[in-house]
Every structure is written in structure tokens, then in C-alpha cells.
Image (tube, helix red, strand yellow):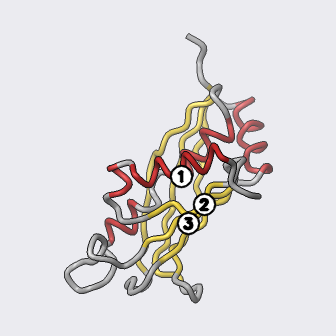
């Protein structure tokens, strides 16, 4: 899947948005249907900690909002989507650019819709790994996303 003009503009806006820009991470790709997002987090003066590796706050902040944003776009305005919880496990110090890929497939979206036909809310857990160029995992993040149907006002 390619980027559309709309997702390319969203990527550009996201990368200049001060809250995200401060993390040092950059959105590299957003699929036109929002089913995939790729992020890169370089080791730089902005992300380097006291011991010369990528700061843990940058590792987390660089991957924080994406599953929530993807589900907002994939489910549509009749659903409420919020970040509920997160955890991070540091596996190795980041000494080079790290990459993360977020994917939500059609089956997951269908399952959420199916669950919400019978329940008022659902929490889903999504993993993401920060990997270096050789594929070595440096950090694992678990995001818990809360989803419910929007109550008409």
C-alpha cells in the first residue's frame, strides 16, 4: 500500500508538530488506508542520553500515539478511541537509528466492531518493537487502547 496525498500531508504535519518533533522521532510512512505506519528514531543530540544511547523517554514518546491514531481513522467517527495504558521493556541500548512498524489489519478492525456489538467497551493490547537496521530488538512497547461506541448526543 502506498501513501496518499492526504496521509503524506498528515505525515509532514505530524513531523513538524512541536509535541512530536521534540521526541526526535520521525514518521517515515503512513499507508493511504491507515493500516500501517512506520517511524524512525535516530540517535542524535536530541535523543542522546547521558551515557550516549537513545533516551528511554524518546523511545517511548516516538511510538506513543500511533495505534490510537490508526484506530481512530480505521474505525471512523462512530467510535471513541483512547490510549489507556502502556509499558516499555528496554532490551538493549539504542546506539543507532531504530525503526518501528505499526500494523492493524482488516480482521482486527472487524473483530473490534464485532465485540462492540455486544459490549459497551473493549480494551485491546498492541505490541510494537523498536529495531535497529539489522533487525535486533532494542525495546518492546505494549499499548493498551480503549475503544467504545460513540453515544449520540
**Cβ–Cβ under 8 Å for marks 1 and 3:** no
Determine whether label 2 and label 1 are within 8 Å by CB.
Answer: yes
Instruction: Classify 10 Å Cα crowding around label 1: few (below 14), some (14-19), many (20 and above).
Output: some
Identity of the residue drawn at 59% across and 85% down: 135
- Which of 107/117 is in front? 107
Residue 23 located left or right of residue 117: left
Instruction: Look at mark 1 in the image and give the residue it sits on.
Output: 11
Is label 2 in a helix, a strand or a loop?
Answer: strand
Name the residue at the top extreme. Answer: 153
Name the residue carrying label 3: 128
The secondary structure type at the circle numbered 3 is strand
Callouts 3 and 2 close, C-beta under 8 Å: no
- Residue 133, position in %: x, y? 55, 85
Q: Is residue 114 left or right of residue 77?
A: right
At 60% from the left and 51% from the top, the residue drawn is: 8
Q: Residue 139 bears which disc, if any? A: none
Q: Residue at x 24, y 77 (%)?
A: 49
Q: In this rendered view, identify the residue nearer to me: 49 or 15.
A: 15
The answer to whether 87 is drawn above or below residue 70 in the figure is below
Does label 2 or label 1 sit earlier along the sequence? 1
Measure the alpha-carbon separation of dots 3 and 2: 16 Å
The image quarter containing residue 51 is bottom left
Distance from label 1 to label 3 (Cα)?
19 Å
Q: Residue 9 or 77: which is nearer the viewer? A: 9
Q: Which residue is mark 2?
A: 29
Residue 122 appears at what percent x and percent y?
61, 40
Q: CA distance from mark 2 to mark 1?
A: 7 Å
| 1 vs 3, front mark | 1
Amino acid at each position: 500500500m502506498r501513501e496518499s496525498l492526504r496521509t503524506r500531508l498528515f505525515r509532514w504535519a505530524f513531523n513538524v508538530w512541536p509535541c512530536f518533533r521534540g521526541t526526535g522521532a520521525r514518521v517515515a510512512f503512513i499507508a493511504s488506508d491507515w493500516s500501517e505506519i512506520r517511524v524512525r528514531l535516530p540517535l542524535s543530540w536530541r535523543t542522546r542520553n547521558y551515557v550516549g544511547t537513545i533516551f528511554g523517554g524518546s523511545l517511548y514518546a516516538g511510538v506513543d500515539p500511533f495505534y490510537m491514531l490508526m484506530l481512530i481513522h480505521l474505525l471512523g467517527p462512530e467510535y471513541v478511541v483512547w490510549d489507556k495504558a502502556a509499558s516499555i521493556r528496554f532490551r538493549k541500548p539504542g546506539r543507532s537509528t531504530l525503526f518501528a512498524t505499526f500494523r492493524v489489519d482488516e480482521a482486527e478492525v472487524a473483530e473490534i466492531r464485532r465485540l462492540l456489538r455486544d459490549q459497551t467497551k473493549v480494551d485491546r493490547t498492541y505490541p510494537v518493537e523498536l529495531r535497529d537496521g539489522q533487525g535486533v530488538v532494542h525495546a518492546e512497547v505494549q499499548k493498551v487502547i480503549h475503544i467504545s461506541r460513540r453515544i449520540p448526543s
